Structures are given as structure tokens and as C-alpha cells.
Image (cartoon, grey):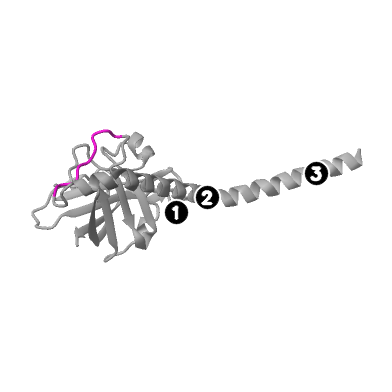
């Protein structure tokens, strides 16, 4: 009995060690598969749209798909190590489960202020906009929609309350603005994000 008891304790110890290793490695594993999935989707998007892009006039306004399940393009923020697909709006909880999304349903690339929202996770650096705070004023943002790549430069970073929708307003400006929205100030006691972090970027 003592021998079996000793073996059982050893087995339990091994299981606990493996469980601890898994819990430690899980965020890294999730990050790897998230990045791989994003890369595959972007590569597939580029291949499918290459011929179509060549036939279009470069000066035409990029079109955002009406189908919410169809990838509209992708966004890249090198300083934050972000390169992720973008989907049509609105950025409902259901749509954000699909990926980074345009904030509003009627968002148009001809708007003066184009807003895109993405989730932030506490333990997954490469999930949607989690690592966006690594960007700073002057960081470049590249948005590819309907085969056209636009470049922006972050000019302002600040927090607002979750119900503040003024960040979606249009402005009188000869430059297009890209507004990136994600969560900030996580409250561990309530399990809620208390603020929204806003990154305003101007067309470069």
C-alpha cells in the first residue's frame, strides 16, 4: 500500500507540474496561433484581391463590404507589433468576436473620421488591439482596404468614458483621421474595463 501511495503522490505531483507549465505557456501558445491565423487570413485576402486590385483605378474610393463576415482588409501598427484583419461594422460584441471592426455600420473610407475598434485582453499581447498602447505619438498606422493602402501617423492618445461617442464625430479638416478604439483601466474587482483608450492618427 505504501508503494502504491508513493506512486500516486508522484503521479499527482507530475500532473500538477504539467498543469502549471500549461498555464504558464497557454498565453504564448494562444499568441502564436492568433498570429498564425491572422497571417493566413491576410495572405489569403491579398491573393484573392490581387487581380481585382490591378483592374481598379487607384484613385477610386475603397469599398467596405456589406457582409459583416467578409474581411474588409487589414491594419498594421509596426511599433505595437499589430497586423490583424479588419471586418465591417458595427463593432458589436458579436462582431468583435470575429475580429477588429469598423466602429459604425455605415462607415465609409470617404469619411473624414474613420473609426476602428478592437478588444484588449489582459493576458494575450497579440490579440486584436491588446498591444496598441505600445504605440506612441508619431507611430505609423497602415490600413489596407479594398486593395488600397493608406498611411496614417498617430497624433493624439487619450482616455474617454465608455459612453463617449464624440470620438466618432466628423471634423472640418482637409486630412482624413483614423480613430482607433480599445479598452483601458481594467478593474479586477468588478471585472470591467472602466475607460476606452483612443488613438487619433492623421493621414500622412
Residue 74 point in image, percent of width and height: 31, 49
Q: Disc 1 vs disc 2: Cβ atoms closer than 8 Å?
A: yes
Residue 170 point in image, percent of width and height: 13, 48
Q: Which residue is mark 3?
A: 9
Q: Front-most of 19 and 108?
A: 108
Please identify the residue farthest to the bottom as the structure is shown. Answer: 138
Residue 167: in sight, yes or no? no
Q: Secondary structure at mark 2?
A: helix
Q: Which residue is mark 2?
A: 27
Q: Which residues are magenta?
A: 60-68
Majority secondary structure in the magenta region: loop
**Alpha carbon distance from label 1 to label 2:** 8 Å
Q: Quadrant of residue 80?
A: bottom left
Residue 148: in sight, yes or no? yes
Relative horizontal placement of residue 173, taking residue 5 as reference (left or right):
left
Quarter of the image that includes the C terminus:
bottom left
Q: Front-most of 185 and 181?
A: 181
**Alpha carbon distance from label 2 to label 3:** 29 Å
**Alpha carbon distance from label 3 to label 1:** 36 Å
Q: Which residue is mark 1?
A: 125
Residue 15 in magenta? no
| Residue at position x 27%, y 45% in the image | 51
Query: Residue 201, labelled with which disc?
Result: none
Q: Residues within 10 Å of mark 3 (few under 14, many from 20)?
A: few
Amino acid at each position: 500500500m505504501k508503494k502504491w501511495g508513493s506512486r500516486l503522490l508522484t503521479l499527482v505531483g507530475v500532473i500538477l507540474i504539467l498543469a502549471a507549465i500549461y498555464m504558464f505557456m497557454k498565453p504564448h501558445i494562444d499568441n502564436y496561433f492568433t498570429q498564425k491565423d491572422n497571417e493566413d487570413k491576410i495572405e489569403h485576402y491579398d491573393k484573392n484581391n490581387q487581380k481585382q486590385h490591378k483592374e481598379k483605378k487607384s484613385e477610386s474610393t475603397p469599398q467596405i463590404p456589406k457582409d459583416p463576415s467578409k474581411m474588409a482588409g487589414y491594419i498594421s501598427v509596426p511599433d505595437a507589433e499589430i497586423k490583424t484583419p479588419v471586418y465591417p461594422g458595427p463593432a458589436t460584441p458579436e462582431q468583435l468576436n470575429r475580429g477588429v471592426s469598423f466602429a459604425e455600420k455605415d462607415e465609409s473610407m470617404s469619411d473624414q473620421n474613420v473609426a476602428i475598434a478592437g478588444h484588449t485582453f489582459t493576458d494575450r499581447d497579440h490579440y486584436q488591439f491588446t498591444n496598441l498602447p505600445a504605440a506612441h505619438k508619431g507611430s505609423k498606422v497602415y490600413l489596407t482596404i479594398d486593395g488600397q493602402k493608406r498611411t496614417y501617423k498617430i497624433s493624439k492618445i487619450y482616455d474617454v468614458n465608455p459612453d463617449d461617442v464624440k470620438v466618432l464625430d466628423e471634423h472640418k479638416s482637409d486630412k482624413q483621421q483614423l480613430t482607433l478604439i480599445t479598452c483601458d483601466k481594467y478593474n479586477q474587482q468588478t471585472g470591467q474595463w472602466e475607460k476606452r483608450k483612443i488613438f487619433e492618427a492623421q493621414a500622412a
